Image: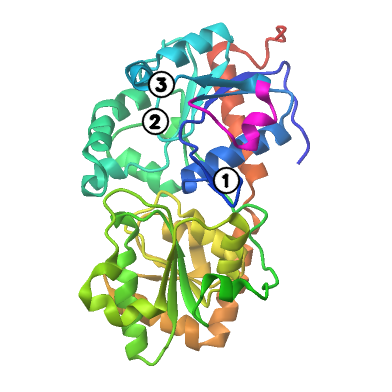
Amino acid sequence: MPARNSCRPLRIGIITDGLLERRVDGQVEIANGGVGVYIYNLVTHLRAVAPQHRYVLMRHGAGDLDIYHDHPDDVVLLPAGLSARLARGFEVSHRRLADELRLDLLHYPNQFGGAFLAAAIPRVMTLHDITPLLFPRYHPWSRVVAYRLLLRRSLRAADHVIVDAAHTGADLRARGLVRDDRVTIIPLAPAARFRPTEPRRDFTTRYDLPERFIFTVGVLEPRKNHALLLEVLRHLHAQGERIGLVIVGRDGWRWRNPLADATAAPLRPWVRLFRNVPDADLVELYNRAAAFAYPSLYEGYGLPVVEAMACGTPVVASTASSLPEVAGAAALFADPTDANDFAAKLLQVLRDPGLRARLVAAGRQQVRSLSWERTAAQTLDVYERVCRDRCGAIDSGSPL
């Protein structure tokens, strides 16, 4: 996608605290799920789509990913100790930096922010979902309280709100939280590495994988509904499908391993749980899976679904929230509270080669229009619109 031009470069501050990091086999990688992937790819592709603008990354604590080291002059690392927490909560540093760096706009890409900024500072927020309000039992009490106290104030102060899917926009409208004209839907995308690949010889042995397996990816927390998949596996075995289950995810809030239950003992040899999988190996797991299952009880988007489709893996997903919107006609859908329904849909995929081929082809078509370049370009349109509406920054022609 060609670089874009405006009358003068913009100075955009992007808050990257929501991008967590980990080291796997000596490499620094993204540690958290969709939010981390979103922030990293947004920054990377904004720089590629519109390099004439300046993107200042602001975070509390060190950042070791390449997006920080490749542009060190555009990175501001803030204190991360206990003494800095109160100032962080009231966005003291963000207010100061917006003034010192003469930023045209601040973007909060991890849910909400900007509640305590001066009104003169334009700001955009990306709200991935409002599950702490909809399903408080799936979140720590501190997060629920923060949403109840600050979300409405942040939305009122935001110049514009980006959501990943129309479903989240509908949730906001249903609660009277934001006007339609201040919401833009910008879908996420699979990274380029998610594609059909050739299997490596040592892979199955290295991971001790079942010969055939159902695959799922997601933070290990109750909302992702991993426990249902053990019941699904039980149903599949009862139907004669001797197939395994592979789960990949980082430890989340209040997750209890369903394999710890005594009733799960017969299934344990068939289940693999991995917490730290290198990115390249994650792609191969998608490729090797007989099917991808996603029984989440609520998703603002569901990035693993489009990653599976990009790898040519047939998908059975939950009927809940945004997942039917994201997957469209390229998946089968099942009730996330009904193991029988999920097992029946997976049986169709496993036993009907024609259906499987149709889902794989439809999945590739579904993700064809998705790219991080497009996500970045659409986000830049929001930035430019806000700056134009607020202060004529695009049209002024004033020097940087």
Whether tag 2 and tag 1 are in contact, CB under 8 A, the answer is no
- Image quadrant for the C terminus? top right
As drawn, the residue found furthest toward the bottom would be 240
Q: Is there CB contact under 8 Å for labels 3 and 2?
A: yes
| Pointer 2 residue | 112
Q: Secondary structure at mark 2?
A: loop
> Vertically, is 18 above or below 389?
below
Q: Nearer the viewer, mark 2 or mark 1?
A: 1
Estimate the x, y position of residue 53 in percent, counting from the top left: 69, 23
Q: Secondary structure at mark 1?
A: strand
Q: Gap between marks 1 and 3, in whole Å?
A: 28 Å
Q: How is the protein colored in the picture?
A: rainbow
The N terminus lies in which quarter of the figure? top right
Q: Which mark is residue 354?
A: none
Does the magenta segment cover residue 70? yes
Compare marks 2 and 1 and give the one earlier in the sequence: 1
Which residue is disc 1 drawn over?
Answer: 29
In the picture as drawn, the residue positioned furthest to the right comes out as: 2
Toward the viewer: 177 or 73? Answer: 73
Residue 183 seen from this side: yes
Residue 181 position in % (x across, y down): 45, 31
> Marks 3 and 2, how far apart in space?
7 Å
Question: Which residue carries the number 3 mark?
Answer: 114
**Residues in magenta, as a range:** 60-72
